[in-house]
Amino acid sequence: MHRSMERWSEQFGPFFRFQVGHRRIIGVADPGAIGTILRDRPDGFRRTQLLETVLDELGVGGVFAANGSAWRAQRKMVMSAFDTRHVKNYFPALSRVTERLYRRWSAHAASGVAFDLQADLMRFTVDVIAGLAFGVDCNTIESEGETIQTHLNHVFPMLNRRLSAPFPYWRWLRLPADRALDRHLAVVHLEVAALIAKARERLAHNPSLKEAPENLIEAMLIEREAPGTRLTDRELAGNVLTMLLAGEDTTANTLAWLIYLASSRPSVMRRLSDEALDVLGPAPFAERLDQVSALNFTAATAHETMRLKPVAPIILLQANEPKVIGDLALPAGTVVAALMRGGSMDERYFERPRSFEPERWLGPAWMGPAWMGPAWMGPAWMGPGSMGPAGSGTPSTSRERISMPFGAGPRICPGRNLALLEISMVTSMLARNFDVIEMRTADGAQVDEWLSFTMAPSKLLVTLARRRSTPGPAQGMRAG
Ligand code: HEM
């Protein structure tokens, strides 16, 4: 779907119109116009009514789906759980989860057996989010058999299917895939209820948490019980599920893309290994936050990966009121598909736009990761400029305003600092200890982009070996 839209924008220009069933949609690939639209929220634009309804039907109503005043209240709550202080305090637990992945990959390397890269990465991201947002040590990395992640994996493909269906058939007819989704969701909702019950118990046993909640779920429970609250039980559970879904595939798929792209450029892999060895020394993974902050090339590789492979290549929005974008008049209710890779592939903004060159993110514009503190002036999509009021300022053409993998404006991804931290932790652990000796797709075809709400690479089977003293090139694959 996203590739068809990108082709249409190449053929018809940065603004075009298409139709899905009876729904008319305006495609926008111009990064300046996209920036203006993303910043004009929540008043000018909203997430689409369809997305809000479909997510709500699945019990995933929460900060991602909400609009207007409901969104404002939930966003404030969520942001407090993902601020720099929380992410910093969470670092020791993140280091422990990374250690578990290191042990799992050491076992894979010792056996020489190819493993499913994305499945392992998703275990990692679920454990991280459960630890940070819910204060629970899930340890799916070291559990065999079914985990919550097994069931979560069925949600996004169905969400995507329902969003692109010409009409909401599932309200009248449950196909086998819809019935399977109901079964997976039932298990997930039970797990979510258990997480909420555990947090309720913690609050009951330790009343001081009411003054200083330690994670998102505790903060939400306190808000839920506050007099005059507007947060409902359903929204509370929906936000727990939103965090699991928003934090799992996005980060895991970005990491999978990074490992795939870096493995296909030996010089990049070598530089990642050298940097990891230099910064981590004898430790197999980062044990301190200041080590992660020193991984500049690793961070640059993450940004270059997200420029070429943004896991959200399309953001759907809907005009709340009549709007003018460029020379287009959009009536209220118009649905806009923002094509997030338009500018990234344009040579006016990036030299050799199709080439994977992490070096382009090094240098004065890239001054360090966001968790280093308020003094740091990061890329525009992280900094105060991007959080500004609707329509603030003319969009600049700096590259951070062109490549916007986390979105922009007031609804920019609240998990971005955590995601960048996770990406650096896993990438440096991999590059420090292992060589990717083979990477192939499960079906033997070329690596392709698959959009099931987030954009994933084809299922990748990877064989690791303990790192040789001098890291060598990965074999058996080429970047597509
Ligand atoms: C590399 C990893 C990630 C990428 C590329 C990513 C990307 C995005 C994008 C593009 C949006 C939409 C932004 C907009 O509308 O302007 C978004 C929203 C969101 N993301 Fe992420 N995300 C990532 C990781 C995470 C993580 C780890 C979490 C936390 C658990 C998270 C939680 C959310 C939430 C709650 C929203 C909805 C925000 C709102 O509507 O106010 N994301 N993300």
Image (spheres, grey):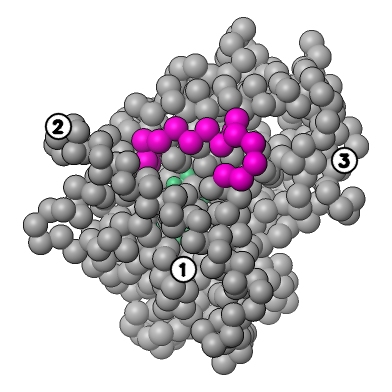
State left or right for residue 161 relative to residue 398.
right
Which residue sits at x=47%, y=28%?
Answer: 94
Instruction: State whether residue 163 is above or below residue 89.
Output: below
State left or right for residue 83 relative to residue 221.
right
Label 1, ligand 1: CB separation under 8 Å: no
Q: Position of residue 27 (x, y in %)?
A: 57, 76
What mark, if any, has residue 477 been given in the picture?
3
Q: Residues within 10 Å of mark 3 (few under 14, many from 20)?
A: some
What mark, if any, has residue 111 been given in the picture?
none
Q: Amino acid at mark 3?
A: Met
Q: Which of pointers 1 and 3 indicates the residue nearer the eye?
A: 1
Q: Amino acid at mark 2?
A: Ser
Q: Main secondary structure of the magenta part?
A: loop
* Residue 264 vs residue 296, the one in the foreground: 264
Q: Say which element carries label 1.
A: loop
Whether residue 71 is in magenta: the answer is no
What mark, if any, has residue 58 been given in the picture?
1
Rounded to the nearest angstrom, the CA distance separating label 1 from label 2 is: 34 Å
* Residue occupying the far top of the picture: 282
What mark, if any, has residue 208 been given in the picture?
2
Q: Which residues are magenta?
A: 132-147
State left or right for residue 468 relative to residue 274.
right
Q: Which of pointers 2 and 3 indicates the residue nearer the eye?
A: 2
